[in-house]
C-alpha cells in the first residue's frame, strides 16, 4: 500500500489509520504536504511488517505488533513502537520517540532530539545527530530480565543523556535538579572492581560496561546487574545521567 498513490480526495482528511491485522503488511508514506492530513497511524498487527516513511513530512505513529517489524520514520516527530519481535526502528529527521519493547531490537535515532527505549531483550541503541536520550524504565523495580543488556552506540558525552527511572532504579536518590549525584557514581577499570564499589551506578571505562549496584557498599550487586554497554569512543560522566 502506498499512500502517495491513493487516488482519493484527502483535503478533508486529517488522520489516516491503517490496521494491518495478520500477515506481512507494507505501508509506504510519501510527502502529503499540501493536503489536510496531519497524522498517519500504522498498526501492523501480526506478521513481519514494514512502515516506510522515508519521504514523509508529517508525523507518523507506527506500531509493529507481533513479528519482526521495520518501522522507518520521516521528517516529522514520529512515535514508533516495535512491540513483540526483533524489530528495527529508524527515526529519521524530527524529534522521535522509539520504543523497542520485547525482543532484540535495533533503534536508530537519526537527526533531531530523540528518545530511545530498548525495553526487554538485548537491544542496540544508536544515537543520531541531535541530543539523544537513552531511557531505562520498566515501571517496576529493577530486574535484569526486564531490561536485558543494551548496547549504546555513538553516545556523545556532554550532549546525549542516559535517563534512569527511579521506580526501576529504586536505590538512586539523585540531585534536587534531577541529575545523578556524584556520590552515586564510580568509574572502574576492571569488572572485578564493580561489586566492591560503594557507588550505585558503576562504569567500566575500558569496556564501556554499565552496572546498577543496588545494594551499594554491601557485598555483590544486590538485585542489580549490568544493564548496558556504552561505546568507549567517548567519555562518560555522572553529569550525563538524569533521574526521573
Image (cartoon, grey):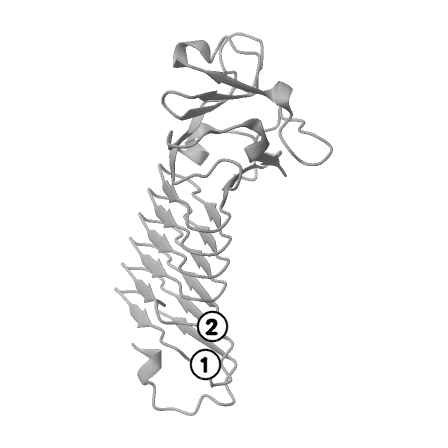
Vertical comparison of 136 with 212: above or below? below
26 or 128, which is in the foreground? 128
Residue 33, disc: 1
For the C terminus, the image quarter is top right
Vertical comparison of 79 with 3: above or below? above
For the N terminus, the image quarter is bottom left
Residue at which label 2 appears: 58
The residue that appears at 44% across and 72% down in the rendered structure is 57
- How far from the left and from the top, in percent, is residue 127? 42, 45
Q: Which numbered disc flags the more N-terminal residue, 1 or 2?
A: 1
Q: How far separated are the C-alphas under marks 1 and 2?
A: 7 Å
Q: Residues within 10 Å of mark 1 (few under 14, many from 20)?
A: few
- How far from the left and from the top, in percent, is residue 156? 46, 39
Residue furthest right as drawn: 176
The residue that appears at 43% across and 39% down in the rendered structure is 155
Vertical comparison of 68 with 32: above or below? above
Q: Left or right of 126: which side holds 243?
A: right
Q: How many marks?
A: 2
Callout 2 secondary element: loop
The residue that appears at 42% across and 51% down in the rendered structure is 109
Q: Residues within 10 Å of mark 2 (few under 14, many from 20)?
A: many
Q: Give the quadrant of residue 49.
A: bottom left
In contact (CB < 8 Å): disc 1 and disc 2: yes
Q: Give the quadrant of residue 165.
A: top right
Amino acid at each position: 500500500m502506498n499512500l502517495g498513490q491513493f487516488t482519493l480526495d484527502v483535503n478533508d482528511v486529517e488522520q489516516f489509520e491503517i490496521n494491518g491485522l495478520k500477515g506481512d503488511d507494507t505501508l509506504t508514506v510519501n510527502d502529503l504536504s499540501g493536503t489536510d492530513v496531519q497524522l498517519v497511524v500504522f498498526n501492523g498487527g501480526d506478521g513481519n511488517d514494514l512502515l516506510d516513511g522515508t519521504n514523509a513530512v508529517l508525523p507518523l505513529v507506527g506500531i509493529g505488533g507481533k513479528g519482526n517489524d521495520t518501522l522507518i520514520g520521516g521528517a516529522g516527530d514520529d512515535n514508533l513502537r516495535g512491540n513483540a519481535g526483533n524489530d528495527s526502528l529508524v527515526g529519521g529527521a524530527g524529534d522521535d520517540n522509539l520504543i523497542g519493547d520485547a525482543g532484540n531490537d535495533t533503534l536508530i535515532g537519526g537527526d533531531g532530539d530523540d528518545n530511545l527505549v530498548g525495553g526487554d531483550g538485548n537491544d542496540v541503541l544508536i544515537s543520531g545527530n541531535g541530543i539523544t536520550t537513552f531511557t531505562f524504565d520498566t515501571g517496576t523495580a529493577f530486574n535484569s530480565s526486564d531490561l536485558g543488556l543494551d548496547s549504546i552506540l555513538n553516545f556523545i558525552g556532554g550532549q546525549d543523556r542516559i535517563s534512569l527511572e527511579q521506580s526501576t532504579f529504586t536505590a538512586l536518590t539523585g540531585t534536587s535538579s534531577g541529575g545523578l549525584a556524584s556520590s552515586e557514581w564510580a568509574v572502574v577499570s576492571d569488572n572485578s572492581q564493580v561489586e566492591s564499589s560503594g557507588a550505585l551506578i558503576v562504569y567500566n571505562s575500558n569496556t564501556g560496561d554499565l552496572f546498577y549496584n543496588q545494594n551499594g557498599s554491601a557485598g555483590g550487586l544486590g538485585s542489580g546487574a549490568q544493564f548496558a554497554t556504552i561505546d568507549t569512543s567517548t567519555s562518560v560522566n555522572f553529569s550525563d545521567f538524569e533521574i526521573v
